[in-house]
Amino acid sequence: MAHTVEKIGGTTMSRIHELRDTLLVRGDDPYGRVFVVSAFGGITNLLLEHKKSGKPGVYAQFADSDTGHGWQDALCEVSDAMIGAHTEVLSAPGDVAQATDFVRDRIEGARNALIDLQRICAYGHFRLSEHMMQVRELLSGLGEAHSAFVTTLMLQRAGVNARFVDLSGWRDEGDVSLDERIERAMAEVDPVTEMPIVTGYAQCRRGLMGEFDRGYSEVTFSKLAALTGAREAIIHKEFHLSSADPNLVGQDAVRKLGRTNYDVADQLSNLGMEAIHPKAAKTLRQAEVPLRVTNAFEPDDPGTLIDDRPADEAAVEIVTGLDVVALEVFEQDMVGVKGYDAAILDALTRHDVRIVSKVSNANTITHYVDASLKQLRRVEKDLKALYPAAEIQLRTLGMASVVGRDLRGLSVLTRGLQAIAEAGMESVGASQGPRNVDVQFLMERDDLQPAIKALHKAFVESESKVQLAA
């Protein structure tokens, strides 16, 4: 049978030593599997910036530094964190020493490269801003190279014929496409007799960060699965893909999906609850490679399979949501005039604002976006200059969404509004498209979590009870 390509995320990577005998080396034959690894948990935050808080890492400090001292201290912090991470994972002193040497070589190499870049950009002919994306790429690759190298050492110590496959382009020819980078690295690899441990970051001509930013490891993972003709692509997480956040609705209330399709995966990505990056999902879908999402710490559970198979029957599969801001543009002269929507989209794109949903009528266009108020103030300023007579309002809201492969005949819109009202809340808006894969409910932000609980109870918990009774 063909091999599988399997990805392990950063939080799970920090416990990779716990998974050695259950996830990586399971059964009599550990081969036929290619693993793509993310950096150890927290390392990419230190290298770039904290994903949630925005606290600056090496990249952010280097971008804002005139003297260069702050980013160098931050780089030392990364080195210490990397050494701490692999000391937890590796048991043999010789392996720890080898991994520490690897970290010091990469960190000092990166330090020297950045110092040289600062020195060159001290001359007026060169501008640092023109090289910052390459800096981001360079730093990103350090984390995945370290975790892949350490995992390889751990497996080799356990008697597995593991191979470190470095796609980061370290001191290598950089002018190659992503496909070429992967194909060259895998040309002599035989998954039947060895276990490749591949870096989640891959250096290539166009770069991954500009388009995918922190989603690059899933893009590498999906490309690798497609190019090598994998039987299945598998993502190992710390949790099952479930009907809702168990921390919100309760562990006993949620149910594992078991099976869904790429339409649902796309809707989840749009709502910030990514099973997989949408561009990675597209790659797998076009290559006809099914995706499986499993709980790494329950290796005997098959998890959830995602493919193009339609649902056997209509059902709600997931209830989720996110905080949004409503950008409402009202202009009396908009009636019958083309171009307003295009101008608003242009402003949102220019300020890198992510659109979740939109509604419009004769004289009002409202975009529900996932962005900071700071970003939207800039958009508002641009639109005011373009349409001085327009009334522009910004309003923070919550958006709950009921998602499933097939929602036909379930009266989700009507029942959802009733469930929210019965829980003592009011929906300020709701929408359902003709594709019948999701229904969105808008409410005051403080009501979002209670609304998700109410919707989950109405569509998932109640249905489960009906099925059990039958």
Image (tube, helix red, strand yellow):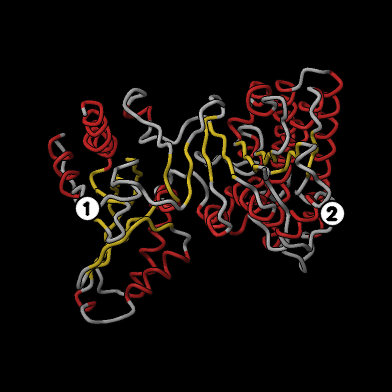
The residue nearer to you, when weighing 121 against 80, is: 80
- Using a 10 Å C-alpha cutoff, classify the residue at mark 1 as few (fewer than 14 neighbours), some (14 to 19) or many (20 or more): some
Position of the N terminus, as image quadrant, is: top right
Q: Quadrant of residue 183?
A: bottom right
Position of the C terminus, as image quadrant, is: top left
Q: Which mark is residue 276?
A: none
Image check: 175 left or right of 373? Answer: right
Residue denoted by label 1? 430
Secondary element at tag 1: strand
Q: Percent position (x, y) of residue 207?
A: 68, 59
Residue depicted at 73% across the width and 50% down the height: 138
Residue denoted by label 2? 172
Q: Percent position (x, y) of residue 359?
A: 26, 63
Q: CA gap, disc 1 to disc 2?
A: 52 Å
Q: Residue furthest front?
A: 1
The residue nearer to you, when weighing 403 against 61, is: 403
The amino acid type found where label 2 is placed reads Asp
The amino acid type found where label 1 is placed reads Ala
Secondary element at tag 2: loop
Any part of residue 347 in sight? yes
- Using a 10 Å C-alpha cutoff, classify the residue at mark 2 as few (fewer than 14 neighbours), some (14 to 19) or many (20 or more): few
